[in-house]
Image (tube, coloured by chain):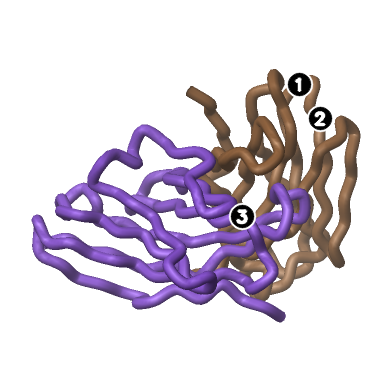
Chain colours: A purple, B brown
Amino acid sequence: EPEVTQTPSHQVTQMGQEVILRCVPISNHLYFYWYRQILGQKVEFLVSFYNNEISEKSEIFDDQFSVERPDGSNFTLKIRSTKLEDSAMYFCASSRDHGNYGYTFGSGTRLTVV
Amino acid sequence: ILNVEQSPQSLHVQEGDSTNFTCSFPSSNFYALHWYRWETAKSPEALFVMTLNGDEKKKGRISATLNTKEGYSYLYIKGSQPEDSATYLCAFSQAAGNKLTFGGGTRVLVKP
């Protein structure tokens, strides 16, 4: 069964450093998403991406964050200057339609900012 | 701010017993209610996407119902098995392709 692949599975970074989280969505999917879960909190939406542009973003997704689909297969989330509070599990998801059959999630990247 | 709540937060079930738990969500501007099963260190796995009031969906021993007028959904597990141990997440959306707003999850532990 097709999978959404995320790398790395765990990343530790120093506060103020830039990180790029990578995702390979399912090849025939058109809609892409990033979510995150801070330890002990609910999974929360960050951004959705369709047709090479952001279609929706949350208030969390400020100027520190950006997304890109650089080569038609990868989907990346960049955090420019990490803060301690960015420590979380970051999930990529994709869907082939508007999510009518659910989203396929990756297994996440655990980001630890020290 | 949309609020999606799940109860209970956690649940211990004896193998072979049946169980159910709840997701409540805003009843206005409803588009879809998703259920996901999430095992530790794995990807959340889509179980159901429900859109119509009164919908009932079934996948093996797991089933779900939906009441959009009162804003709740139940997930049922019949004859629980140890492999059903996971966190079950519900998520609500207000439009096609719109963001999912998640509940806090119900963690189910099935004891042999």
Residue A42 image offset from top left, x and y in percent = 44, 44
Residue B25 image offset from top left, x and y in percent = 64, 29
| In this view, A87 is above or below B66 | below
Q: Which residue does the image show at 72% across and 69% down from the upper left?
A: B15
Chain holding disc 3? A
Q: Which residue does the image show at 83% across and 53% down from the upper left?
A: B63
Q: Which mark is residue B67?
A: 2
Residue with the mark numbered 1: B70
Side (left or right) of B83 relative to A92: right
Badge 1 local density, few (<14 within 10 Å), some, or many (20+)? few
Q: Which residue does the image show at 53% across and 73% down from the upper left?
A: A73
Residues marked 3 and 2 touching at CB (< 8 Å): no
| In this view, B40 is above or below B4 | below
Q: Amino acid at mark 2?
A: Asn
Q: Which residue does the image show at 58% across and 42% down from the upper left?
A: B100
Q: Amino acid at mark 1?
A: Glu
Q: Quadrant of residue B66?
A: top right
Residue B85 image offset from top left, x and y in percent = 61, 67
Side (left or right) of B41 relative to A11: right
Side (left or right) of A113 relative to B29: left
Closer to us: mark 3 or mark 2? 3
Residues marked 2 and 1 touching at CB (< 8 Å): yes
Regarding mark 1 in the picture, which secondary structure is present there?
Answer: loop
